[in-house]
């Protein structure tokens, strides 16, 4: 079975290593977020303004990422 080995120089590449280890969480977050946006487009929404929509969608993104064990804070 083929394998891939990633090598990082720590502590300099700590951020890159952390992102590589958490890549599946980031990918799942993107998929979940895309599904959330699709749901709003397909079934409608109750946003009262563009600002309200942006705030709610940003909160949703952070909730999804938290659920998948990742955060934008991991990216320095």
Image (spheres, grey):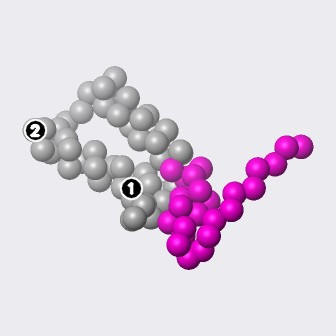
| Residue 25 placement, left or right of 46 | right
Query: How busy is the neighbourhood of tag 2: few (under 14 within 10 Å), some, or many (20 plus)?
Result: few
Q: Nearer the viewer, residue 69 or 11?
A: 11
Q: Secondary structure at mark 2?
A: loop
Residue extent of the magenta highlight? 1-26
The percent position of residue 53, horizontal first and vertical second, equals 19, 41
Residue at horizontal 53%, vertical 45%? 28
How many neighbours does mark 1 have within 10 angstroms: few (below 14), some (14-19), or many (20 or more)?
some
Q: Residue at x 24, y 33 (%)?
A: 45
- In the displayed orientation, state which residue is furthest to the right: 1
Q: In the image, residue 30 lies at what x, y percent?
A: 46, 42
Left or right position of 1 against 23: right
Q: Nearer the viewer, residue 22 or 41?
A: 22
Mark 1 to mark 2 CA distance (whole Å)? 21 Å
Indicate whether 31 appears above or below 60: above
Residue 48 part of the magenta-drawn span: no
Is residue 22 rendered magenta in the image?
Answer: yes
Q: Report the side of 76 relative to 68 (left or right).
A: left
Dot 2 corresponds to which residue? 49
Q: Based on the displayed image, in which of its 4 quarters is residue 49 positioned?
A: top left
């Amino acid at each position: 079975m083929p394998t891939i080995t990633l090598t990082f120089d720590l502590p300099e590449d700590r951020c890159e290593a952390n992102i590589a280890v958490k890549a599946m969480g980031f990918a799942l977050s993107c998929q979940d977020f895309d599904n959330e946006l699709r749901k709003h487009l397909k079934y409608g929404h109750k946003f009262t303004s563009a600002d309200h929509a942006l705030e709610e969608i940003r909160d949703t993104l952070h909730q999804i990422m938290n659920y998948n064990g990742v955060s934008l804070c991991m990216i320095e």
